[in-house]
Image (tube, rainbow, N blue to C red):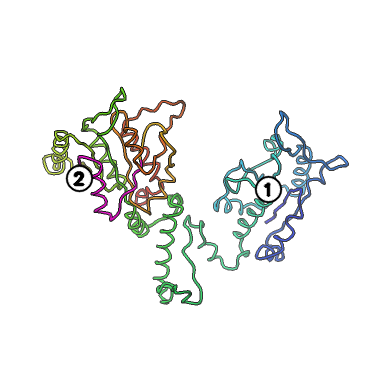
Amino acid sequence: MRFHILTIFPEYFDSPLRVGLLGKAIKKGLIQIYIHQLRDFAMDKHKVVDDKPYGGGEGMVFKPEPLYRAIVSIKERDPEAKVVYLSPQGKLFHHHLALKLSQERSLLLLCGRYEGIDERIKESLVDEEISIGDYVVFGGEVATLVLIEAISRLIPGVVGKKDSVEKESFSGHLLKYPSYTRPAHFMGMKVPDVLLSGNHSQIEKYRRELSLKITLEKRPELLNKAPLDKEDLKTLKNYLTQQKIYIFLVHYPVYNKRREIIASAIANIDLHDLSRLARTYGIERVYIIQPIEEQRIFGKTLIEHWIKGGGREYNPLRSEALSLLKIVSNIEEAIADIRQKEGMRPVLIGTDAKAKRSYLTPEEVRSLLFEKPIVLVFGTAWGLEENFLHQCDYFLEPIWGRLDEYNHLSVRSAASILLDRILRPYLLFKKTS
């Protein structure tokens, strides 16, 4: 495979291209790398390749003329070269994009710097724009090296053992299992017995389970692309049961439309929809916080009809869902019930239609799931009372409108959306179909 690098700092690549497997691959002729100085394509005596941006602003922009001449010249000699521009605005680079690019015969890697390149070059000559991450470095040279290394190791013969490439992190959409070497005992820490057993089938099983566990905890979004069999799903389900998630539906203290503190009434539809939501998403229990005794009796009567009475025979699936509901008189009773079950106090995460305080994103909530039991606290009527809301440990990012600030969802809709945002990477049941 051929790599052309267009840069104003050719010397940047002197050392990286001489060492390690990359240097060996170049010596063997498995890959060819040609470095082109952009300034060689400037026509003025000072070799100027940049200028101030039209419209004002900071920094400089690569001029179109040298870029045009350079790209055309390189492509005349190597018509198969695909032009890739390295910039923060590009498509995020990942293993499977590297795999796709490794199928090309030739790549022309354009190293951006300053404020970028003239947009007309991007529109007319660039085939693909790529970023190596959501951050900014001094220039595209370091990004170019990342691409060259990631792509080169996928070319046959560059890495000694094909098996070692196939079993790396990301190649199968899973992170790699932990590695150990001699000595077997080090500073009181021992290599897992299974790795010393010589039982290769058990070792493979152990490593697969650890890869699944590490991916689930660190990069769960990868699992939706990973090829998973029934044993994998069984393993993942066992790990997912460690995530303890609860819902509180609070009827007091909440506001009415006039911002008065009230106790709202239990709604039959809330019981049905929240219980079905909980069963679908694997929620441990839904607590209905209701201080009014008559309302608690009303709610319990409804639930018992579906889990013990005629409703159970009529719709067993509904019965299974409603069995997750528990009606209590106050939040302290619900917290005590969870503490007894889990052995620790749960983390309370309040919700509201507006950003009442600094908030956690769904991704940040996700990072708590393997640490402690969490509770998503939802208010009824016109939302949780302010002082009560501030007693929560965290506040969850609200649901934003797409076109304007309108946000007046039912608690059932809001709970569904928020749970889906938090748990979406873990929704793997589709893999069994």
Q: Left of 129 or right of it: where is 264?
A: left
Q: Is residue 407 above or below residue 319?
A: above
Residue 350 lies in the magenta stretch: no
Task: Please state which amino acid type lies under the numbered disc 2.
Answer: Ser
Label number found at residue 129: none
Can you tell which quarter of the image residue 325 is in? top left
Residue drawn 23% across the image and 49% down it = 337
Which residue shows up at 48% across the image and 75% down it?
Answer: 186
Image position of 270 with respect to 76: above or below:
above
According to the picture, the residue beneath numbered tag 2 turns out to be 323
- Residue located at (82% from left, 46% from top): 40
Q: Which residues are magenta?
A: 323-349
Q: CA distance from mark 2 to mark 1?
A: 57 Å
Q: What percent of the width, then of the height, locates residue 277?
A: 29, 41
Q: Extreme left residue here?
A: 309
Q: Quarter of the image holding residue 65?
A: top right
Give x and y (percent) for residue 240: 34, 54
The residue that mark 1 highlights is 140
Give SS at disc 2: loop
At horizontal 51% and vertical 57% (from top left) the residue drawn is: 171
The foreground one among 232 and 433 is 232
Which amino acid, by three-letter code, is at mark 1? Answer: Gly
Between 352 and 173, which is closer to the camera in this rendering? 352
How crowded pointer 1 is (Cα within 10 Å; few <14, some 14-19, many 20+) is rated as: many
